[in-house]
Image (cartoon, rainbow, N blue to C red):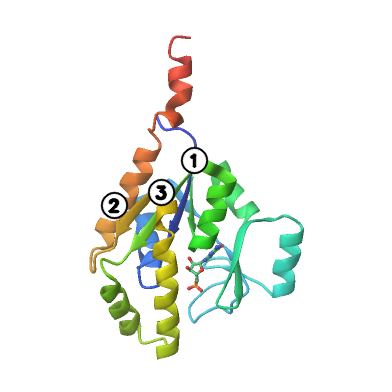
Amino acid sequence: MKNKGLVFVISGPSGSGKGTVVDELRKICTDVGVSVSATTRKPREGEVDGVNYHYMTREQFEKLLAEGEILEHTEYNGNYYGTLKREARKIIDSGKDLILEIEVDGGSQVRNLMGDDCVLIMLLAPTAAEQERRLRDRNTDTEEAIAGRLAKAKIEVAMAPQYDYIVLNETGKTLECANDILHIINASHYTVSRMRTVTDHYFD
Ligand code: 5GP
């Protein structure tokens, strides 16, 4: 017996392989729903509106913010990113676990809002050197952008104490990594506090 859907934050520095691992997780587990965030950044080649993000202007984003329609948000590289309440609600109402693939600032906002009702997972490359190698292999960034991403990684790793779990994404082991996350998701449903409804009514 599984209790209702829980909220999982997955954060990790650029180069940790977060996107790939979350895609894999979706393939091996149909009980999770990944929230599609809103952003003001332009779509990259191959990205689809409503699938990767809900793309919008700053004015549209700020309007949603003022209307209280955004659960958490941040400004990253000059663009807004935020979780839409309606997206989160849709997934929770379907009974699935909600996955928020967001950066650390958003992660700490979710923790402040939900306390222990959420689970925060940080994904890391095995070493900073390996993370840097992955960023360089992508061949998409300038030296300046890579330096920026590595500097941001230091801030992100420093936030690890606020997280509940750290998972390493070994190179070439996406499936193993997604499975590690799935184990955390499954175990999280059976903590004593989340099974309280069972113990409270056991003798009824
Ligand atoms: P990218 O532009 O590479 O797609 O995303 C940049 C960063 O923004 C990534 O670390 C990603 O996890 C984070 N991000 C994406 N959506 C959200 C969101 O809704 N809220 C927050 N706080 N961060 C997000």
Q: Amino acid at mark 1?
A: Asp
Q: Is residue 142 depicted above or below 164 in this figure?
A: below
Give the crowd class for mark 2: few <14, some 14-19, many >=20 residues within 10 Å.
some
Q: Amino acid at mark 2?
A: Asn
Residue 81 lies in what quarter of the image? bottom right
Q: Secondary structure at mark 2?
A: helix
The residue at which mark 1 appears reads as 116
Q: Is residue 165 depicted above or below 202 in this figure?
A: below
Nearest to N terminus: mark 3 or mark 1:
3
Nearest to N terminus: mark 1 or mark 2:
1
Q: CA distance from mark 1 to mark 2?
A: 23 Å
Residue 123 lies in what quarter of the image? bottom left
In the rendered structure, the answer to whether residue 158 lies left or right of residue 63 reads left
Q: Secondary structure at mark 1?
A: helix
Q: Secondary structure at mark 3?
A: loop
The residue at which mark 3 appears reads as 30
Residue 137 can be seen, yes or no: yes
Q: CA distance from mark 3 to mark 2?
A: 13 Å
> Front-most of 77 and 26?
77
